[in-house]
Amino acid sequence: MSQTLQVLESDCLAFPPLHNALKNPNGLLAVGGDLSIKRLHNAYLNGVFPWYSENDPIMWWSPDPRAIINTSNVHITRTLNKFIKKNPYRVTLNHAFKDVIRLCANAPFRTDGTWIIDEMLNAYLNLHENNLAHSIEVWENNELVGGLYGVAINGYFSGESMFYTKKNASKIALVALAKHLKSENISMIDCQIVNDFLEDMGCVEISREDFIREQKQHTDMSISNNFWQPKELTL
């Protein structure tokens, strides 16, 4: 049976049922709409995220399988553990969101174009200003050398992108995020789509059905009022 891709109207925030997502590539669910705070909030609330390139329409995705990391199962190798014990970096939460997302968009290791185009960057800055997007920063002295950012709704955190300019800095950011989430009994990081780096850090794939079940449990969680307030994090 052929599938028809739904085009989102600007006056409707609803997404089609997730099982309507195309099998290939990566669960494309719908196109169009906008990147308003309300639409993005509704998207992440339902396990949907935008991902597209410049000159493309806005594309909305719900992959099956879905990539996640259990916060208790982050893979820390002996080499990384030794590096962490040397304590070469300082880690913070929500101290430099704008710098992190800009560095993610222009990360030195990127050989292809970035999907964090200006429209996306501004949308996530708006989410951050409304306490829906957050960053982890890794510092060497006063230089920002690594970090990540993502979207959070209650206990659900969906990682969007990361960067590094110094050894192990993005790994440190992920370890710090997992520890911070685990402190509030949050057991899952949504990684969306697996890659080699995430797999090395303990990322696994689960079915969309299992993901939505776990995601709902996390969006229904209550978290501390100061959980995402700017602070220093420990490893």
Image (tube, rainbow, N blue to C red):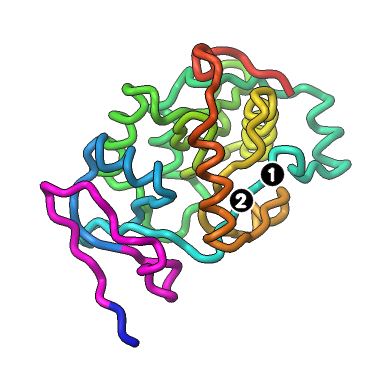
Residue 167 seen from this side: no
Q: Which mark is residue 68?
A: 2
Label the magenta part by its dominant secondary structure. loop
Q: Is residue 187 left or right of residue 45?
A: right
Instruction: Judge by depth and name the residue closer to the eye, 58 or 68.
Output: 68
Say above or below: 82 vs 86: below
**Residue 19: where, in percent of width, then height?**
41, 67
**Residue 124: where, in percent of width, then height?**
33, 35
Q: Residue 170: within the magenta?
A: no
Please identify the residue farthest to the bottom as the structure is shown. 1
Say above or below: 207 vs 221: below
**Residue 132: where, in percent of width, then height?**
39, 29
Kind of residue at disc 1: Asn
Q: Secondary structure at mark 2?
A: strand
Please report the residue visible at 57 percent of the width from the left and 31 percent of the height from the top. Answer: 145
**Residue 65: where, in percent of width, then height?**
56, 64
Please report the residue visible at 48 percent of the width from the left and 17 percent of the height from the top. Answer: 95
Quarter of the picture containing the N terminus is bottom left
Q: Is residue 103 left or right of residue 71?
A: left
Please report the residue visible at 32 percent of the width from the left and 57 percent of the height from the top. Answer: 60
Badge 1 local density, few (<14 within 10 Å), some, or many (20+)? some
Kind of residue at disc 2: Ile
Residue 59 seen from this side: yes
Q: What span is colored magenta in the figure?
A: 4-29
Q: Which mark is residue 70?
A: 1
Q: Are marks 2 and 1 in contact (CB under 8 Å)?
A: yes
